[in-house]
Amino acid sequence: MNILLTGGAGYIGSHIAVALTDAGHRISIVDNFVNSVPEAIVRVEKITGKNIVLHKTDVTDREDLTRILHDEKPDCVIHCAGLKSVGESVKKPLKYYRNNINTTLSLLESMKETGIERLVFSSSATVYGEDNIPPFTETMPKGRCANPYGWTKWMQEQIIEDVVKQLKISTVILRYFNPTGAHKSGLIGEEPNGLPNNLMPYILQVADGRREHLTVFGDDYNTPDGTCRRDYIHVMDLAEAHLKAAEYVEKNKGLDVFNIGRGIPCSVLELVKAFEEASEQTIKYEIGSRRDGDVQDIWADTSKAEEVLGWQVHRGINEMCQDAWNWQKKNPAGYAK
Ligand code: UFG
């Protein structure tokens, strides 16, 4: 297939680019590099040995995007472009609503204009209401999101649902749980902007000496060790889910939604321990107070993705930790030379 990937230079997008290219698909990337760097695409080319077509454009620039879709004529669009920092979204809600909603409106309008008929959308487990009890199934109540970022994902899902029905665009929505790790090569990985918000990037910076210690946000939850549990998934397993989704929309009409996680809970302290074992580093940590908006337990029921998409997870927590540490060691300054 000829697949156009928005946000393809980002952490998740670059891994999807590798998975699709390795599977023999031809891809083109649209990215504005607001939270990514062109070097990531150079590295994808190095891993895959293939040239990647790059359009440096903002997805919200509808005219330009329409021109690109018209020229590329993709069989399918995978839409990953968007702002993703939960904390920043609370401080700058307008920026998040304007950008994230507009990327999807612009893309759908351009797809309508150019007659592109297949879409895969990157959504998030954050769309599930806070009151659900894990494992989360796709049909559980949604909305009541904890922050503006979450609302933008949920609103984009709503917009997509209404529009693709009417335009008859075959669509898969993937709800990501907690992607982590990096490609085996250590050439691509996650590059947080400033102080990391997420657990694994923070652990990595403690491991390489940049931060003195990790603060564990609360150990008084009702879990076996008192810390919150999440569903960490290797970013290459997540990337492979996009490959399956693209192949699925090629053959199936309508709209379908899938959880993409491992379906196995892992606590903060369990991840710290697993990282210490995988990296042979000691992670100094202190117990702090709970973080606002944190939910105690989040993990997926992944049976639908396994049964319908024929997708399976191949990598465990140990591999996530090893690959994340390999990326960090090889790229202490991220993509900067
Ligand atoms: N945590 C710490 N210390 C840190 C960072 C995180 O103890 O320095 C804890 C958090 O309290 C939480 C767990 O580690 O219990 C995971 O936190 P992350 O910030 O890594 O991930 P979240 O589950 O909070 O959020 C992630 C994505 C969001 C997405 C959400 C969906 O970052 O974009 O999953 O469930 F919306």
Image: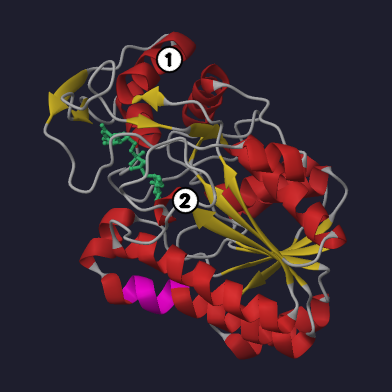
In this view, 275 is above or below 34: above
> According to the image, what is the colour scheme of the structure?
secondary structure
Q: Is residue 316 above or below residue 298?
A: above
Determine which residue is flagged by label 2: 140
Element under disc 1 = helix
Is residue 42 left or right of 263 when viewed as pictured? right
Q: Quadrant of ligand 1?
A: top left
Q: Which mark is residue 274?
A: 1
Residues drawn in magenta? 95-100
Residue closest to the far left: 289
Q: Nearer the viewer, mark 1 or mark 2?
A: 2
- Residue 276 among magenta residues: no
How far separated are the C-alphas under marks 1 and 2? 31 Å
Please determine whether, in this image, residue 232 is positioned above or below residue 24.
Answer: above
The image quadrant that residue 313 belongs to is top right
For disc 2, the neighbor class at 10 Å (few under 14, some 14 to 19, many from 20) is: few
Query: In the rendered image, which quarter contains the N terminus?
Result: bottom right
Q: Residue at x 45, y 45 (%)?
A: 191
- Residue 25, percent from left and from top: 85, 53
Examine the residues drawn in magenta and state their main secondary structure.
Answer: helix
State the image quarter where residue 80 is shown: bottom right
Pointer 1 local density, CA inside 10 Å: few below 14, some 14–19, many at least 20: some
Identify which amino acid the numbered label 1 is placed on: Ala
Q: Is residue 36 left or right of residue 167?
A: left
Instruction: Determine if the magenta segment contains residue 96.
Output: yes
The reply to whether residue 45 is in sight is no
Taking depth in this image into account, of 318 and 129 the one nearest to the observer is: 129
Q: Residue 58 appears at what percent x and percent y?
A: 55, 76
209 vs 10, nearest the viewer? 10
Q: Which residue shows up at 52% across the image and 47% down it? A: 176
**Which SS class for mark 2?**
loop
Residue that appears at 18% across and 24% down: 219
